């Protein structure tokens, strides 16, 4: 089965584009092969990430950082098969409105919406749609990520290491000596979550630093010293970062009933943020995970080769050419 894919559809580079490409290549053996490879790789990475995250959670429990008997609120499963991102977002908001009304609460505002799911189920796109819809309703929307907190702790560990007498600038930074239980507790105490010029932000004060995440998130926090050492730090600070995130999010929603925090991530970490509004995006046809990723790769490559006056037939040829290059 083929569909007409013109330049305007290709240029959208969104779910409508990828769905059209999946339909176009539905009986193409090369596409099926690429999709299976992509899907297998995604599932393998998800399994590896889950194992690493669980090891960090188990370590945090052993250290007494987090409660080993903690139980999160139950998740509501949403099968995204055949649904548009707008449809998934609307279903989530409808569920929240229904549950809030039954509890006698306002339908929105002062809430945390948690989104989990395997890679390829559309978590990021769903969060983006929710942000757009809620923002248009006049709500203050915060999309929370633990990534910058891990980067901030890594930066503090790097600065601490550089200040030691044994530090040798000519060698690779070794953060292991910096990551003692006492040091990690000290680094976390150097982070505070406050309003800065009317906006919530993480303040970093310590180890010679006096700044906030928003000022350095696209510079220092993405520099090589931080990037290379995040895995080492994240491995031993999962519990501490989880508690920081939980406290920060609670601080926001308790102080502003007009705020909605959208929290996307792996279950192991977002479980520790309290919220009755928890959604697990599933895909009853698991082969679509690989098909979506394959389509995303093909459409990005094709857009780089196509021109705005390219005919549908020309774009079809470009798509097929880019597909064959990826095998």
Image (spheres, rainbow, N blue to C red):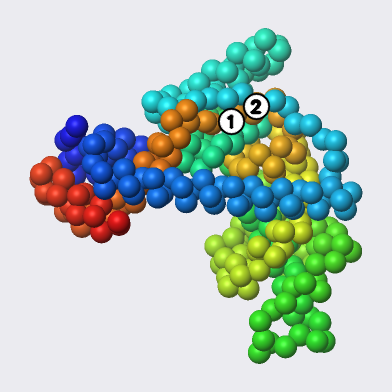
Question: Measured from the top left, where is residue 225 in percent x and y?
Answer: 63, 73
The image quadrant of residue 290 is top left
Sequence order check: which comes first, mark 2 or mark 1? 2
Residue at point 63% right, 33% down? 114
Give the residue pinned by disc 1: 280
Give the residue pinned by disc 2: 75
Asked whether 40 or 87 is in front, the reply is: 40
Asked whether 88 or 247 is in front, the reply is: 88
Q: Secondary structure at mark 2?
A: loop
Q: Is residue 107 left or right of residue 119?
A: right
Q: Is residue 271 left or right of residue 37?
A: right
Label 2 crowd bin: few (<14), some (14–19), many (20+), radius 10 Å: some
The image quadrant of residue 286 is top left
Residue at point 69% right, 42% down? 268
Residue at point 74% right, 73% down? 175
Q: Is residue 171 left or right of residue 292?
A: right
Asked whether 65 or 244 is in front, the reply is: 65
The reply to whether dot 2 and dot 1 touch (C-beta < 8 Å) is: yes
Q: Secondary structure at mark 1?
A: strand
Q: In this orientation, does residue 289 appear? A: yes
How many marks can you see?
Answer: 2
Question: Measured from the top left, where is residue 48 in percent x and y?
Answer: 60, 52
**Quadrant where the N terminus lies?**
top left
Label 1 crowd bin: few (<14), some (14–19), many (20+), radius 10 Å: some
Q: Is residue 165 left or right of residue 317?
A: right
**Quadrant where the C terminus lies?**
bottom left
Question: Measured from the top left, where is residue 306 in percent x and y?
Answer: 18, 53
Residue at point 75% right, 69% down? 157
Q: Can you say whether 243 is above or below 105 in the image?
A: below
Residue 241: which numbered mark, if any?
A: none
Question: Measured from the top left, where is residue 287 in percent x and y?
Answer: 41, 37
């Amino acid at each position: 089965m083929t569909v007409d894919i013109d330049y305007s559809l290709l240029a959208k580079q969104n779910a409508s584009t990828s769905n059209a490409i999946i339909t176009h290549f539905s009986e193409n053996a090369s596409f099926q092969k690429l999709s299976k490879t992509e899907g297998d790789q995604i599932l393998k990475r998800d399994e590896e990430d889950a194992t690493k995250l669980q090891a960090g959670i188990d370590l945090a429990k052993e250290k007494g950082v987090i409660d080993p008997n903690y139980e999160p609120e139950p998740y509501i499963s949403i099968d995204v098969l055949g649904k548009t991102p707008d449809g998934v977002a609307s279903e989530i908001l409808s569920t929240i409105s229904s549950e809030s009304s039954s509890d006698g609460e306002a339908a929105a505002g002062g809430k945390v919406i948690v989104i989990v799911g395997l890679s390829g189920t559309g978590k990021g796109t769903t969060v983006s749609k929710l942000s757009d819809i809620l923002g248009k309703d006049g709500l203050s929307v915060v999309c929370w990520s633990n990534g910058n907190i891990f980067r901030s702790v890594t930066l503090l560990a790097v600065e601490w290491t550089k200040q030691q007498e044994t530090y040798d600038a000519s060698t690779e930074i070794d953060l292991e000596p910096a990551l003692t239980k006492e040091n990690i507790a000290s680094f976390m105490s150097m982070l505070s979550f406050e309003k800065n010029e009317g906006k919530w932000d993480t303040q970093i004060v310590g180890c010679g630093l006096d700044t906030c995440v928003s000022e350095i998130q696209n510079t220092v926090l993405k520099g090589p010293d931080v990037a290379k050492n995040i895995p080492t730090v994240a491995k031993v600070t999962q519990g501490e970062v989880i508690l920081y995130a939980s406290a920060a999010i609670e601080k926001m929603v308790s102080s502003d009933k007009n705020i909605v925090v959208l929290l996307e991530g792996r279950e192991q970490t977002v479980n520790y943020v309290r919220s009755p509004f928890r959604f697990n995006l599933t895909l009853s046809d698991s082969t679509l995970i690989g098909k979506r990723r394959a389509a995303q790769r093909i459409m990005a490559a094709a857009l780089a080769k196509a021109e705005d006056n390219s005919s549908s037939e020309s774009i079809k040829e470009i798509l097929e050419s880019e597909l064959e290059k990826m095998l």
